[in-house]
Amino acid sequence: MKSLWKNGETNIMALVRQTNSTWSEVDRNIKFLENLGIVESRCKKNQRLIKLKKKCDTAETVIKALQLLEMANLDQLIV
């Protein structure tokens, strides 16, 4: 979430690198967030692009929480 908030739309492999995780873990989390309506994905050529959904109350709440953590210098705790 933090990466999507900071970088906007990004591909799934960039998220894998940024989170130091595996593709399957990131894919599972993206699917979970899609089911909640927080993120949306689309395919462009051979890339899967992920972004936060606009005008989503849940996403806006999470973004506000990330902003508060960043202001308190606690955002390093969240990848």
Image (cartoon, rainbow, N blue to C red):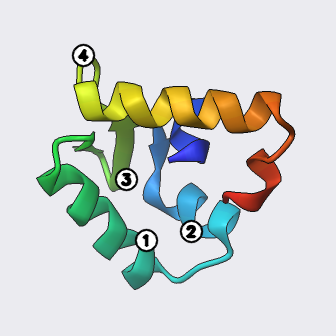
Residue contact between numbered discs 1 and 2, judged by CB atoms under 8 Å: yes
- Circle 4 packing at 10 Å, graded few (<14), some (14-19), many (20+), is few
Residue at image location 65% in from the left, 28% down from the top: 67
Mark found first going from the N terminus, 3 or 4: 3
Q: Quadrant of the C terminus?
A: bottom right
> Which-is-in-front pick, marks 1 and 4?
4
Q: Which residue is mark 1?
A: 26
Spatial separation of the CA atoms under disc 3 and disc 2? 13 Å
Q: Which residue is mark 4?
A: 55
Amino acid residing under circle 4? Lys
| Amino acid found under the numbered disc labelled 2 | Val
Name the image quarter holding residue 42.
top left
Residue 44 placement (x, y as % from top left): 29, 41
Q: Quick one: label 1 or label 4, which is nearer the N terminus?
A: 1
Three-letter amino acid code of the residue under disc 1? Val
As drawn, the residue found furthest toward the right would be 73
Q: Would you call the spot at circle 1 few (<14 residues within 10 Å), some (14-19), or many (20 or more)?
A: some
Q: Which disc is residue 16 wearing?
A: 2
| Helix, strand or loop under label 4 | loop
